[in-house]
Amino acid sequence: MEWLWVGVAYGLGWLANRVGWPPLVGYLGAGFVLWALGHSSSEFLGTLADIGVLLLLFTVGLKLRLASLLRREVLGVGGLHLLLFALLAGLLALGVGFSGEAAWFLGIGLAFSSTVLAVKLLDDRSELATFHGRIAVGILVLQDLVAVGLMAYAGVKNPTPWALLLLALPLLRPLVVFLLERSGHDELLLLYGLGLALGGARLAQALGVSPELGALLMGMTLAAHPKTSELSRTLWGLKEAFLVAFFLKIGLMGLPTADQLLRVLGLLSLLPLKAGLFFFLFIAFGLRARTAFVTSISLASYSEFALIASVEAVEGNLLPASFTQTVSLVVALSLALAAPLNRGVHRLYQRYEPFLLRFERKGHHADDEPTSLGGAEWLVVGMGRTGGAAYKMLEKQGHTVLGLDADEGKLEAHRAKRRNVRYGDAEDPELWERLDLTGLKGVLLTLPDLEAKLRAAEGLKRRGFKGIVAATSYHREEDPELRAAGVTLISRPFAEAGERLAERAMGLNPLEAEEAEEKEEERR
C-alpha cells in the first residue's frame, strides 16, 4: 500500500510541478485518485500527516517573534475578520435551516484559514520572515488560539487549569539552548528537533490544548538563537516528506456526490468574499495595497481545523452527520484552488496593480519601502550569509553600500554591526519603480528564491538600469531565466567556495588576517 501512495504522489506531484503548480496540488490530486481507486486513509498515514504538521509549526515557531503577534494589523484585522466572516457565514447557515448554535459554530469554523497551506507556501517562497509573511502567520496563530476555545465549547477538548503552564515554556529556554548547542550538526540535531516538536505537542495535548499549538510554542522557546536556522534546515527534508501524507490524507476524503455538489460550490463561492474582506481590512489598517493583496491571498482558504470541528460538532449534536463529508470536500478543494493562486500571487498583483492601488490610503504605511539609496554605489538585495559577505567586501574596498532585506531579524543583526540596511521586498514591483537609481554602479541579488531574483532583475530591466546586475545561482537550469530577466553576472557560491579554498591552500589568499578581523568585529 505504502509504495502505491508514494508512487502516485510522486507522479502527480511531478506533473503539477511541470505545469507550474506547487507539487502539493499533485499530492491532493493523488489522494483523489487513490480514493477513486477504492483506497482509504489509514492510521499510519494519519500519524505521518500529524508529524508533518507538528514539524511545520515547530519550524514556524523557530522564526516567530512575540512582537509580530501583538501588532495592530494582526490583532485588529485578525479579530475583526473572524467576527465579520463568522457572522456572515453564520447568517447564511441560519438561512438554509441550521439551528442558531450550529450556525454560529459552523460560521467560526469557516472563518479560519489553513495554517498548513499558508505556512508551507510562504516557506517555499522564502517569505515567512517578510512583513506580509509575519502578518499572515500572526493571524493564523490568533485563529489557532480561538480554535482552542471553540473546541472547549464543543466539549471535546477542555483545557485543564494547568494549560496556562504552556505560557511558561520560555522558562525552559536555558535548558533547551544548552542541549541544542551540544547536539552537533547531523542526526543528533535532527533527533533533538523532532523530540522537541513531538514533546511540545504531547505536553499541550495532555493539558487539553491543541498539539499543534504546543509544537509552535516549543519552537518559539528557541526563536532568535543563532543555531535555529541550521535546525530548521536539518528538519526540512523530514518535514516535507511527512507533509505529503497530510495532503494525501485530505485528498482521500473523496470527491462530492451530486447531492453534495451544490453545498460544496456554495461554500467555495464564499472564498473570494473571505479574501476581499481581508484585503479591505488590511487597507483600513494602513497597509499598502500589495501587502494587503499578497497576505489576503495567503489566507484565502478553509482551514483543516474546519474538518476537525465538523467531526466534533457532529459528535456533540451541533451539526447533522451528513455535513462532515461536505466540509471535508470544501477544505480539500479550497486547498487545491488556493495553491496555484498563491504560486502566482506576485504576477497576479502586477497585473491588477493599477486597480488595486485605487484603494490604498494616502500617507505613511507601516510597510513603506525606501525611495532613495542615500548615495549608495552598490545595492545588495538579500542580507543572508552570502549577502552579508558581499556587503563586507564592497565596504572594505571603500564603496558606499546599501543592503535590502524583507526579514526584520536579519536587518536588526546587521544594524547591530552598524551596517547601512533597510527594509525592502525584492518581489515588490513598486520598490523598483520608485527607487532612485542615480549613481548606482551595480546590484547584487543574493536571495535564495529564484522567483524573487527574477522579479528584481525584471524590475531593474524595466527601469533601463545599465549597471551590473549580479545574482547567485545554485542550479545551472536557472541560468537562462536569470539572463533573460537582465542578470549580467552569475555566481555559483559552492563552486567559488572551492576555488577560494584552493587559493588559500596554495597560500594565494591567506585566511588568518580575515579571521582575526571577523573576530574583532564580533567582539565589538
Image: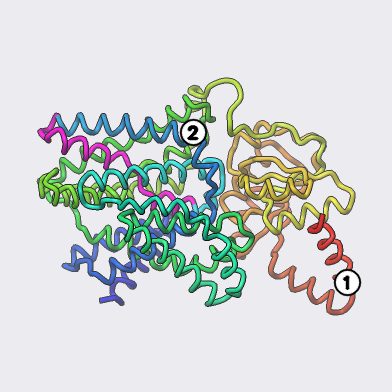
Of 487 and 335, nearer the camera is 335
Q: Which mark is residue 355?
A: none
Task: Look at the image and give the residue range highlighted in magenta.
Answer: 95-122
Q: Which mark is residue 73?
A: 2
Residue count near mark 2 (Cα–Cα under 10 Å), binned few <14, some 14–19, many ≥20: many
Q: Residue at x 18, y 67 (%)?
A: 37
Q: Which mark is residue 510?
A: 1
Where does the image place residue 120, in percent across and percent down from the top left? 44, 54
Q: Residue at x 28, y 74 (%)?
A: 4
Q: Amino acid at mark 1?
A: Pro
Q: Is residue 109 magenta?
A: yes
Q: Secondary structure at mark 2?
A: helix
Residue count near mark 1 (Cα–Cα under 10 Å), binned few <14, some 14–19, many ≥20: few
Q: Earlier in the sequence, mark 1 or mark 2?
A: 2
Where does the image place residue 222, in percent across and percent down from the top left? 55, 58
Q: Amino acid at mark 2?
A: Glu
Q: Secondary structure at mark 1?
A: loop
